[in-house]
Image (tube, coloured by chain):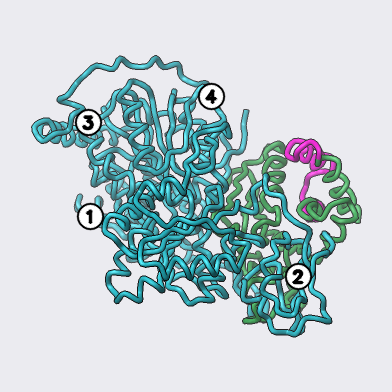
Chain colours: A cyan, B green
């Protein structure tokens, strides 16, 4: 039966049909749904791991133990999992192993737009790259056989447009697989120098064998059309090429971007007059062509920045586009922002008001950077706030540590914040770390993590006690504050910054979007009492607007968190608005 | 046949994902090739969001570029103007007249451009302005704005009303089916 699936659901279906037994992942846009969809299959073990390195190692040793295993992560997650990846290339696998990595060209929800194909080249492992959901399903299913045939982990490169676009697929049956026997084999799996030296030549030979396989494999294909122009392309760019040119050009579609074959390229080049390479982000295929001595046009026409569309290709080839009238008025930007009732807001207001330097981290709370709160000073990568604060404080005088904090979410703290906190305690850093505990992994769409007390299926699980953990890591001053209580936030921040030892503030209140959270009736503004001071607007709450100088509360958005009430000196904000 | 391009735009959290799910299901059942592209993640937190729906005999690209959209269905007035450059010269904007202030307006750094629709009409753009919030409330819930707007779009697509109602039954949670069917029917006939 034909059905529509987003690419990530199709990957999940493909892995399932391919005989997957275990998946372990850490959520990250645009990869998250792969693991969420897999968790619905009863005959697969699925789990959220605290970070991508843990996930990759769980999946690898499941493979070592004899079953087909996978993990999924966003592009920057592969940085975290890179350590095992590079040596997994040497050990190879027992059961098939697939590592799904989703790039985010245009950075819809990411801090950089790195091209994961570099990892395939650097780690010397094969990579597959589907161009729509049907290919995502087929490639994922076939990836296990490829992994076992060539004794290698297989990377599956997704991107936002393939991960989050629905297209038509037809599902198939799950292949029957028996777990492989585990046999002790130190020469293959104990990567100490003497063994690893013998494995490296195996890796080089495997790459050569895979390149030969790529000459005539089901992942790469030639579609001959007109021969004036030949286009070599991969992934979602293939769709844009076909959209613009249809069959009027010839296309070499690459579904296995690493390793790349030679003869397939030189043969194709010989059949067309002019050769172009169209690929998102870095010139990987283009560089391969140039290494083969082929004359190609690539990044001089197409930017290494952002994602493409059919418009990109039309513009590059000088094809006409329609001119369209637009409105005369300036259209104000609509950036994402923290939700009405977001528990992060009260804490960020406190930090902003006290002019504290805030080293930020990755999550919904990165939105604390947006005006009017403008509370953040830096955001780098998962965990960097905590470790970075120590370095930042050391670079200044003793006063700096009394003016600076790190903020990190509960899930991000589990991911890679704990080690930074150990370093703060161990090296006697007078640093103050604020854990924004909203009881869920928020930005990626509400996934459980080790602090929530539930596993991926929503079943009860061991729950990390954050206070006890921080104490155990060597922090004596640990206190909990409700971020809806502005006076308590102010006192906590001032007292912990003044203390002459490391400290942790846990700002604890569940995400307001959680179904388990009961919200209050909306507030309203008493117009007679409003003195037009606009103090409430400094919170940056989407429910509060200024109309003719006076505050107005949108009753469809307000959840009655009362934070603005605490701020109003004129008691103009009152309970008892009507829910629309 | 020519591919038909529909953009669904609005503010994160307004329910556009259900609209695209309904549309995708319906078009697939009608035997078309369909692609639906949306973006999850950070932009959903109250930001400007866009979903592309394309259908025809064979659809390649999952996205719609400038000058290509046959329909822009906007859940909010300002967003219709933001994406207007994507409209084809023969295209039509179906827009909910509801105004949702973006952050620069909320904090007083910008004003809401209230006249954007008349500016577009003055330039010859086909605009169907719909008070979808009132129609949805009349049908029983403000949350049915998405279905109200889909019903307005339905008038222009070659698919009869009963097929839409059947698709609603397949995509909406059972307890919301009657509400959404009522909202669709009221809007379709209005």
Looking at the image, which is closer to me, A307 or A408?
Answer: A408
N-terminal label among 1 and 2: 1
- For disc 4, the chain is A
Which secondary structure dominates the residues rendered in magenta? helix
In the displayed structure image, the side of residue A381 where residue A450 appears, left or right? right
Closest to the observer: A67 or A351? A351
Instruction: Give the residue drawn at x 58%, y 34%.
Output: A458
Mark identifier at residue A290: 1
Q: Earlier in the sequence, mark 2 or mark 3?
A: 3
Q: Which residue is mark 3?
A: A91
Q: Which residues are magenta?
A: B149-175
- Identify the residue at horizontal 77%, vertical 84% (top origin): A548
- Residue placed at 52% from the left, 21% from the top? A173
Residue at 42 percent across and 44 percent down: it is: A73
Alpha carbon separation for disc pair 2 and 3: 61 Å
For numbered disc 4, what is the local secondary structure? loop
On the question of residue A222 being in view, the answer is no
**Dot 4 alpha-carbon crowd within 10 angstroms: few under 14, some 14 to 19, many 20 or more:** some
Marking on residue A172:
4
User: 10 Å neighbourhood of mark 3: few (<14), some, or many (≥20)?
Assistant: many
Residue A553 numbered tag? 2
Parent chain of label 2: A
Q: CA distance from mark 4 to mark 1?
A: 40 Å
Question: Do the numbered discs 2 and 3 sit on residues whose CB atoms are within 8 Å?
Answer: no
- Residue A225 is one of the magenta-drawn residues: no
| Residue closest to the eye, A473 or B148 | A473
Please tell me whether residue B166 belongs to the stretch shown in magenta.
yes
């Amino acid at each position: 039966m034909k059905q529509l699936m987003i690419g990530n659901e199709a990957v999940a279906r493909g892995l399932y049909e391919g005989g997957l037994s275990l998946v372990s992942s850490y959520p990250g846009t645009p990869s998250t749904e792969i693991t969420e969809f897999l968790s619905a299959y009863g005959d697969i073990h699925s789990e959220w791991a605290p970070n991508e390195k843990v996930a990759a190692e769980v999946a690898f040793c499941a493979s070592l133990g004899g079953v087909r295993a996978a993990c999924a992560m966003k592009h920057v997650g592969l940085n975290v999992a890179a350590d095992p990846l590079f040596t997994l290339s040497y050990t190879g696998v027992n059961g098939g192993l697939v590592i799904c990595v989703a790039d985010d060209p245009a950075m819809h929800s990411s801090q950089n737009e790195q091209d994961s194909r570099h990892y395939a080249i650097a780690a010397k492992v094969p990579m597959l790259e589907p161009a729509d959901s049907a290919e995502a399903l087929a490639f994922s299913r076939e990836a296990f056989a490829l992994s076992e045939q060539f004794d290698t982990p297989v990377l599956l490169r997704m991107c936002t447009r393939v991960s989050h676009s629905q297209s038509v697929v037809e599902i198939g049956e799950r292949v029957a697989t028996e777990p492989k026997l585990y046999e002790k084999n130190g020469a293959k799996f104990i990567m100490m120098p003497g063994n690893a030296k013998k494995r490296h030549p195996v890796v080089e030979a495997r790459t050569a064998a895979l390149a030969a396989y790529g000459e005539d494999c089901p992942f790469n294909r030639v579609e001959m059309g007109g021969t004036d122009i030949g286009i070599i392309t991969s992934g979602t760019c293939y769709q844009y090429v076909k959209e613009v040119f249809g069959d009027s050009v010839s296309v070499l579609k690459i579904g296995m971007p690493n390793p790349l074959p030679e003869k397939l390229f030189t043969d194709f080049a010989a059949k067309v007059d002019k050769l172009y390479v169209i690929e998102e982000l870095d010139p990987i295929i283009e560089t391969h062509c140039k290494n083969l001595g082929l004359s190609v046009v690539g990044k001089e026409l197409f930017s290494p920045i952002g994602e493409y569309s059919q418009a990109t290709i039309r513009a590059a080839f000088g094809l006409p586009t329609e001119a369209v009238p637009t409105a005369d008025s300036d259209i104000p930007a609509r950036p994402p922002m923290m939700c009405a009732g977001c528990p992060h807001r009260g804490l960020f207001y406190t930090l902003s008001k006290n002019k504290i330097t805030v080293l930020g981290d990755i999550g919904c709370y990165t939105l604390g950077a947006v005006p009017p709160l403008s509370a953040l000073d830096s955001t780098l990568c998962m965990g960097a706030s905590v470790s970075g604060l120590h370095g930042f404080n050391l670079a200044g005088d003793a006063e700096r540590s009394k003016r600076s904090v790190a903020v990190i979410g509960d899930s991000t703290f589990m991911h890679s914040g704990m080690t930074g906190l150990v370093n703060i305690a161990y090296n006697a850093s007078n640093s103050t770390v604020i854990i924004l505990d909203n009881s869920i992994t928020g930005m990626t769409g509400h996934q459980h993590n080790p602090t929530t007390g539930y596993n991926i299926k929503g079943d009860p699980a061991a729950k990390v006690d954050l206070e006890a953990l921080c104490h155990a890591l060597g922090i004596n001053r640990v206190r909990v504050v409700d971020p809806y209580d502005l006076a308590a936030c102010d006192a906590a921040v001032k007292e912990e910054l003044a203390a002459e030892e490391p400290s942790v503030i846990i700002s604890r209140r569940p995400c307001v979007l959680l179904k388990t959270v009961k919200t209050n009736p909306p507030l309203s503004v008493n117009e007679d009492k409003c003195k037009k001071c606009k103090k409430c607007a400094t919170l940056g709450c989407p429910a509060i607007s200024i109309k003719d100088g006076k505050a107005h509360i949108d009753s469809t958005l307000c959840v009655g968190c009362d934070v603005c009430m605490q701020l109003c000196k004129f008691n103009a904000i009152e309970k008892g608005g009507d829910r629309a | 046949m020519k591919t038909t391009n529909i953009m669904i735009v609005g503010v994160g959290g307004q329910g556009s994902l259900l609209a695209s799910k309904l549309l995708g299901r319906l078009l697939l059942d009608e035997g078309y090739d369909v692609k639906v592209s949306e973006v999850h993640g950070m932009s959903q937190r109250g930001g400007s969001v866009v979903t592309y729906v394309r259908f025809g005999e064979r659809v390649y690209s999952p996205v719609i570029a400038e000058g290509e959209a046959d329909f822009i269905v906007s859940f909010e007035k300002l967003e219709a103007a933001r994406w207007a450059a994507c409209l084809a010269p023969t295209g039509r904007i179906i827009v909910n007249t509801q105004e949702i202030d973006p952050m620069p307006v909320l904090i007083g750094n910008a004003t809401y451009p209230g006249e954007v629709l008349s500016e577009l009409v003055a330039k010859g753009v086909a605009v169907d302005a719909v008070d979808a919030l009132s129609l949805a409330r009349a049908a029983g819930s403000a949350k049915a704005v998405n279905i109200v707007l889909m019903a307005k779009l339905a008038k222009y697509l070659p698919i009869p009303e009963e097929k839409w109602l059947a698709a609603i039954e397949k995509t909406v949670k059972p307890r919301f089916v009657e509400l959404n069917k009522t909202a669709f029917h009221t809007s379709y006939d209005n």
